[in-house]
Amino acid sequence: MKRIATVFCVLSIVISHSQELGKSSLELKKFFIGVNAGGYLGNKKTANFYNGADANGLSRVLNTTVYRDQIDQELAYDWYFGEFPEQMRYSVALQLGVHLGYHLSDGFALIGDVDIINLKAQDFVTFLIDDPNNGLPEPTIETMPILGEEKRLNFNFGFQNYLSQENNTFVYWSMAFNATSTRFVGNTLKVRNLPDYYVGDPLWIGSVNPNNGTVINDRGRTRPGGTGYGGLIGGGVKFKFNEQFVFDLGYNLIYTTIKLTDYDSVFKERGVQHSLFLRLIWG
């Protein structure tokens, strides 16, 4: 109860402060809704989930006779596996979503966001190939790309507090509760010109083609995933360019838990995610 009372006290102070801010010539509407697009950078802690080191991962492919024979033919010479990547990272992903809010005063608003993010983590595993034509006493080291893909659904609910309102420009900071739902999409290895070998657990996606290692049934019901919780702090600038529309450029730092738990194990990591966005708001 003390924590709840403290939160309400802080909000009361913020709202009182917001009501004292000067107004722009174009006022913001009570209710506002918009769409946003931006870049999202996921924390690297969960990227290594896709490096193939799991017992049901890359070893399954390399120890399957049909796949190994295909790789033998493609590489032409004797080979053996080298190393897994140890520091996989996510690429910056496109973030698309909906933003809405309601002004409780001229300088304070409740806000909510829903964003969809498609993330990719890519790195390389190494193969050592005994190529007699390389002119070296050591085997040739060749890198093969390994790729992981996941979807995230990002929910935020919190508030915006305007720090200044001048010349139709509104500078604000924000805080919000965050919930991030994560779902595994795929995990593949590319060996030269061969089809992409699926290196995750086959139960995650349904079934795998026994002849070439590709996914043939994408209806698995045990995909790794889950919902993690955390918080957000951010800031931005709104520019109201006419009576109806507002441009909003901002940044959010999200500290939350990402879950990729499957039927057999619990995998979750807590860390910082980054989001830089541009919104077009009606209101």
Image (spheres, grey):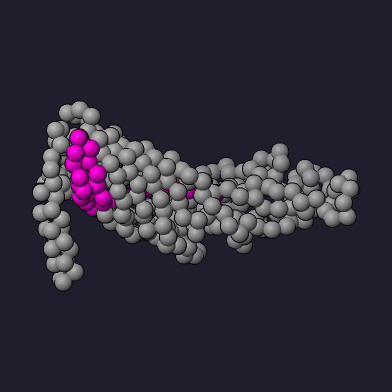
Residue 72 left/right relative to 84: right
| Image position of 243 with respect to 1: above or below | above
Picture coordinates of residue 244, whole percent (x, y) = 19, 29
Count of residue discs: 0
User: Which residue: 70% across, 48% down?
Assistant: 143
150 magenta-colored:
yes
- The residue closer to the viewer here, 121 or 161, is 161
Q: Main secondary structure of the magenta part?
A: strand
Quadrant in which the C terminus appears: top left
Residue 254 located within the stretch drawn in magenta: no
Q: Position of residue 245 (x, y in %)?
A: 22, 30
Which one is in front, 21 or 47? 21
- Residue 275 x %, y %: 39, 47
Q: Nearer the viewer, residue 199 or 32?
A: 32
Q: Is residue 18 left or right of residue 201?
A: left
Estimate the x, y position of residue 76 in percent, counting from the top left.
Answer: 83, 44
* Identity of the residue drawn at 29% across and 44% down: 236
Name the quadrant containing residue 280.
Answer: top left
Quarter occupied by residue 212: top right
The residue segment tinted magenta is: 148-174
- Identity of the residue drawn at 88% across and 55% down: 137
- For residue 23, say whether it is visible: yes
Could one spot residue 96 in this view of the protein? Answer: no
In the rendered image, the residue lying farthest to the bottom is: 2
The image quarter containing residue 13 is bottom left
Q: Is residue 131 left or right of residue 169?
A: right
* Quarter that holds the N terminus: bottom left
